[in-house]
Amino acid sequence: MLQMANYEFIRKQHILLGKPIRQISRETGYSRQVIRKALKSTEIPVYRLSKPKPKPVIDSVQSIILEWLRQDEQAPPKQRHSAKRIYQRLVDEYGFTGGESTVRRYVRQLRVSPPKAFVPLDFPPGKFAQFDWGEVTVLLQGKQVKVQVFCMRCAYSRKIFVKTFFHQKQEALLQGHVDASAFLGAVPQVVTYDNLTTAVKKVLEGKNREEQERFVQLRAHYLFDSYFCDPGKGHPKGQVENLVKFVQKQFFTPVPNISSLEELNQILLEKCISYETTNVPRFSLTVGEAFALEQQLMLPLPSRPLDCCRIVSVKSNSLSMIHFEKNAYSVPVSHASTELSCRVFTERIEVYHGKNLIATHERCLEKGKELLQYDHYLDLLLTRPGAVLYARPLHQAGFPPIYQRFLDKCRYRPGGTKEFVRLLLLHREFDASLVEETLGEACQKGMFQYDAVRQLLFQRTLPEHRLPRLTLTEDGSVPHIQVKAPDLSQYNRLLQKRSVKPKLLQLARCEYIEKAENIMFIGNSGTGKTHLSIALGKEACHQGYSVQFWTAAKICNELIEAQSQKRILQLGKQWLKTDLIILDEVGFVPLSKTGAELLFQFCAARYKKGSMIITSNLEFTDWTQIFKDEQMTAALVDRLTHRAHIFAMNGDSYRFKQSIQRS
């Protein structure tokens, strides 16, 4: 076949030099027909087959392949012949000897689809928006995680909204629409979608769709219409499909390294705002300027946003767990084995019993996990303290080391694990960080007791509730009376050493109870104060008297709770009916101001009406450490020591002696 250079030579020889065709033919060896063809056209010569090339290998099975492909048109898309499968069948069933590449080439030629063509579209302002999902990879706390990208674009102004979720479930679709509407400040009249299953329950004939109930609720709340593309054809929403590619290339390249999805969404929000400076194609306006015109024609926002959740009915089991999406979530033990309902949001799950919210959990997107909140099991652990050491909810809680130290100190004494559970219940009243700090203080002071920790907590929170001090004006209307400071040291003379045993034997007859007299054991730790008070209490029980035993910290906690519940008078009347109250460890734990005042009122109320046995490791002059006020301390000591049997217990510690003997 002649090339363009040959055409050029022939034309110059004939036209410029005047040579006849016959002479050019003799000189070049080209036929006169070829020379005439070169003289008629200056088009670049192209080789054209006069007839198709023979294909002896594929021609023998051509009809078979065509028949199989015709049958494939009626078969499910995922069960149609591939070129490889056609080759395998030809070899197995017809003894085909050609190569696989020959079959592949022939099938590829048969499957060539016609070129795609699209009509350029213009959209009226305020009417249309398009939605689609995308998927990207991010570095979340150093780990590669796939996240789903919610993309919406206004068709007229090209304004965009982009947000990421961990999944494409229905609640994420709803939340994305709510957030997009809030960002736009208005609602597009029509939104174009794929046939996503979170919105479409069933594809009907033509453009008709049976939509999901929650998606219909979204449309009813925001009053927009939905338009669904034909299955497998997304060209009606080409703008948002281009947006997905744009976002992947521009917003997520390089791969973002973030600490949370909230941080990433804040970055994306800023990028959406900065995108407003982009020019709209074929317009002299920017995206922001075009949207300002479009927003006026969009639908207004409703008065409140839609709750983006789906409601699922569940039933808790005997372990006080519900199961959702192959994960277990705890509920309070009072709702074990109960019919409940879940409100499932994108990132959390709320569990309801009727209309009452009983539990909230962070939503887990993995499978086979247990999400247990220790607080849900504390009420049950109070009645079953033996399970504390092996309770899975406590293991999952990940408490700071100070809690384990407290448990190690408590677990070996009677009621110790139960006391630890009561300690955890303090989290319902006080902030966890405050409880942790108070535990540290209690451990430093060796106070491994619930009541001690509670009193320390009251002291820490007291400034927030303290009443302002009364200030009197100096106008002469109120007389000025100077009160002499009390001298508590005078009461220490009552602690002079005296014979204990005869006096105790006399007290064992319980005549002091009939006379409403008090007994006080004051002295060092380990000298038998609590032991003697319990012994006298047991003897009083044997003689038919009613007896109660309290530590000072515990009775203060009880009084504070009764005051908050407005039953302090009722409780006081009940205690006045008790013949003997043993008040142990006065001064061992510093009391809060409120606790000290209530304890003073309690002791003052029993003056000459009921007996008390009090143990303390502090001299009377040091009781101001407990009650914080000298006047109140003096008044209390005066009442307690009046008509009281006082014992000074200043010997060596019996516990120390026993430890020496064991060693």
Image: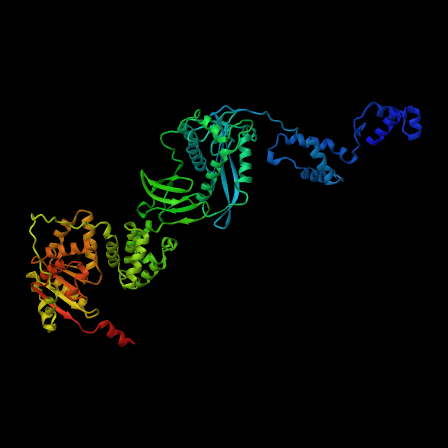
Residue 611 appears in the figure: no
Q: Nearer the viewer, residue 413 or 431?
A: 431
Q: Position of residue 301 (x, y in %)?
A: 39, 29
Q: Nearer the viewer, residue 129 or 86?
A: 129
Q: Nearer the viewer, residue 611 or 380?
A: 611
Q: Nearer the viewer, residue 171 or 134?
A: 134
Q: In the figure, is residue 149 to the left or right of 462?
A: right
Q: Position of residue 660 (x, y in %)?
A: 27, 76
Is the residue 474 above or below the residue 662 in the image? above
Q: Position of residue 36 (x, y in %)?
A: 87, 23
Q: State the residue at coordinates (53%, 45%).
A: 255
Q: In the figure, is residue 434 to the left or right of 291?
A: left
The mark tally for this picture is 0
Question: The N terminus is located in which quarter?
Answer: top right
Question: Residue 629: which quarter of the image?
Answer: bottom left
Q: State the residue at coordinates (64%, 32%).
A: 72
Is the residue 296 above or below the residue 632 in the image? above
